[in-house]
C-alpha cells in the first residue's frame, strides 16, 4: 500500500520498497525470543516470597518452557510462510521482459535532476564529483 505524506521531499511512500526483510526479520526474532525469555523467567524463577530460591527443577522447567515456545514460534512462522506461498515454485522468467527498464533514478529530491547524465569535464574542469576519478 502507498501512504501519502504532507512532505514535499517525500510525498508518498510504499513500505514494500523501503523495508528490508534481511535485517528486519532477524531483529524481530531476537525481540520475540527476548520477550519470551523474560516472561518465562518472571513466571517461573521469581516470587514475592523473600525465602524463595529457584531450584534446578525450576530452572530446567524454565529452559523447557523456553524451548517449547521457540518450537511453537518456528512452527507458526513456517505455517504462515507456507500459507502465503513462500515455498511455492517461482513463476517462470519471461525472456522478453527487462526488469531493469525504468529503474534508473533521475532525482535525489523533487525535480533536481541529480542523476541526469552530464559531461564529466567542462572546459578542463571536473563538473561532476561523483563521476570524478
Image: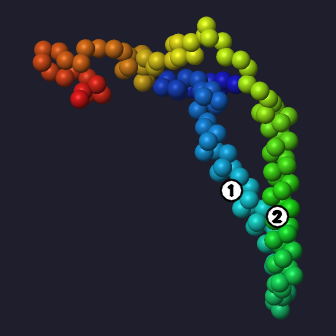
Residue 48 seen in render: no
Left-right relation of 32 to 122: right
Q: Picture coordinates of residue 24 (x, y %)?
A: 64, 44
Residue at the image position 79 percent from the left and 34 percent from the top = 87
Left-right relation of 22 to 29: left
Residue at the image position 33 percent from the left and 14 percent from the top = 117
Sequence-wise, the earlier of marks 1 and 2 is 1
Q: Which residue is mark 1?
A: 30
Residue at the image position 71 percent from the left and 52 percent from the top = 29
Q: Nearer the viewer, mark 1 or mark 2?
A: 2
CB atoms of marks 1 and 2 within 8 Å: no
Mark 2: secondary structure: helix
Q: Residue lying furthest top in this view? A: 96
Q: Residue lying furthest left in this view? A: 124
Which image quadrant: the N terminus? top right
Foreground residue among 13 and 61 = 61
Mark 1: secondary structure: helix
> Within 10 angstroms of label 2, few (less than 14), some, or many (20 or more) residues?
few
Q: Which residue is mark 2?
A: 67
Position of residue 56 relative to residue 17, above or below, is: below
Q: Picture coordinates of residue 53 (x, y %)?
A: 81, 88
Which image quadrant: the C terminus? top left
Can you tell which quarter of the image residue 106 is in?
top left
Amino acid at each position: 500500500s502507498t501512504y501519502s505524506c504532507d512532505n514535499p521531499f517525500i510525498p508518498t511512500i510504499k513500505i514494500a520498497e523501503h523495508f528490508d526483510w534481511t535485517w528486519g526479520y532477524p531483529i524481530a526474532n531476537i525481540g520475540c525470543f527476548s520477550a519470551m525469555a523474560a516472561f518465562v523467567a518472571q513466571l517461573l524463577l521469581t516470587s514475592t516470597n523473600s525465602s524463595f530460591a529457584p531450584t534446578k527443577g525450576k530452572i530446567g522447567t524454565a529452559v523447557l518452557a523456553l524451548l517449547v515456545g521457540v518450537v511453537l514460534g518456528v512452527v507458526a512462522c513456517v505455517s504462515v510462510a507456507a500459507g502465503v506461498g513462500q515455498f511455492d515454485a517461482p513463476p517462470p522468467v519471461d525472456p522478453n521482459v527487462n526488469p531493469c527498464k525504468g529503474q534508473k533514478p533521475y532525482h535525489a529530491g523533487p525535480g533536481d535532476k541529480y542523476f541526469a547524465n552530464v559531461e564529466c569535464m567542462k572546459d578542463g574542469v571536473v563538473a561532476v564529483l561523483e563521476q570524478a576519478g
